[in-house]
Image (cartoon, rainbow, N blue to C red):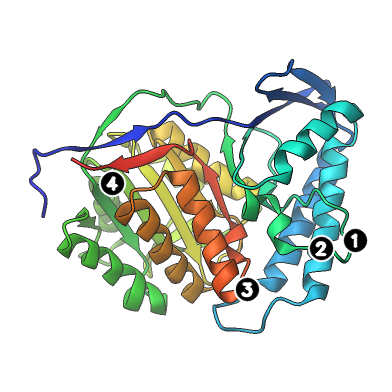
Amino acid sequence: MPEQGKLSKIKYQSYPIDIAFRIEKSDGRYELLIRISGYESKKFSLQIREHDLAQLSEELHKKLSNMVRNNGDIDLTNEDLYSLAKVGNDAFIQIFGNIDEALLEIIKEIIADGDKCLEITSDEFLFPWELIYPNDPHEKETLSIKSFWGLKHIVNRVLCLKIPSPSLINFCPRLGLLAYEGLPTVKSSEVPQFYDYQNQSLINLIHLVFTTTEAEDLRTEFKTFWQNDFDLTHFACHAQHDNAYGRSYIRINENFDVTIQELRTFGIKIKDKPLVIINACEAGIMNSLSVSNFVNIFLNLGARGAIATECTVPDQFAADFSRKFYEYFLEQKRPLGESLLATRQYFLNEYNNPSGLLYSMYAPPNIQLAGD
């Protein structure tokens, strides 16, 4: 295990944002501000309304959820791809169809090449941006799963008022693990992964292992866990969306679910601005609103940023995705945005599996673990 007093660093490398979108609501309508380096910033009113946005977001999630599977299952079909691309392209048109043609052509030209960094700032316009498809889905010759934003570009969300400082941060890789071992591959694969990293001296692991089944004692142990200094916090868990106010929850133990409301009222303060990874899997049914609420709470509590699943992710895939993501981020020390994009592309290229599109980033893409 690394010496406790010996610090490596998590830092922000200079990282260009190729296109920045900021969306705010004004007089019941969404306003889109577009910033592109070297061009004058421009603002437009969006055609899409709040109700239509919710329906479009739900439809995209539904289409992708129908395609989600574990590695090695039936390959992605052209019918699956065409169905998802149609909705993704409809989203592109509804969001960007009201901007002037010259600017639209500039945007299309920039995103024609891969590995761009697209930043979306908004508190209210909650949307699965990774599923935007800018090309004509009816052009069968050019129809490609690799044209979805989330498989071609780094896409990061900034919740308004949560913009982090770009300063260097002293960082010893202390990883807090909260794992629901009622999920088979969490116990057999995901948890052992972090013990392997500890044995390789890549992290200092702090694993929350409950010692009680009493509700009040479980809450106490959960709150005490957060008194540690963390640089990364990983949830390997089940999550469930509930339409009732504040009742969506994360299951960490068979006897302990923590709701959005409880996270707000437990009096937890997160120290040292960790990056929070919410790898929610199995039967969890989330949506953009639930995910952003959880992320927003962790940011308010002091987190540096978060990566979270948008909706149902199979247990096995969640464990596989976690292992590959940390290979890039912890072992190869690649920046966060590149690590997430490379993980999505790996599962697509190796298994024809687009399920990595279910992971969203609410963090600066240039967070990076550096050596000593």
Q: Which residue is mark 1?
A: 139
N-terminal label among 1 and 4: 1
Q: Badge 3: few (under 14), some or many (20 or more) residues near its Cα, within 10 Å?
A: some
Check contact, mark 2 vs mark 1: CB within 8 A.
yes
| Left/right of residue 39 with respect to residue 11 in the rendered view | right
* Residue 114 place in picture, x, y as percent: 64, 47
Residue drawn 40% across the image and 32% down it: 13
- Front-lying residue, 46 or 332: 332
- Front-lying residue, 166 or 208: 166
Q: Which residue is mark 2?
A: 143
Residue drawn 61% across the image and 41% down it: 116
| Left/right of residue 339 with respect to residue 198 in the rendered view | right
N-terminal label among 3 and 4: 4
Residue drawn 64% across the image and 49% down it: 288
Q: CA distance from mark 1 to mark 3?
A: 21 Å
The secondary structure type at the circle numbered 4 is: helix
Residue type, label 1 = Glu
Q: CA distance from mark 1 to mark 4?
A: 54 Å
Q: CA distance from mark 2 to mark 3?
A: 15 Å
Work out which quarter of the rendered image holds the C terminus and state it: top left
Check contact, mark 1 vs mark 3: CB within 8 A.
no
Q: CA distance from mark 3 to mark 4?
A: 41 Å
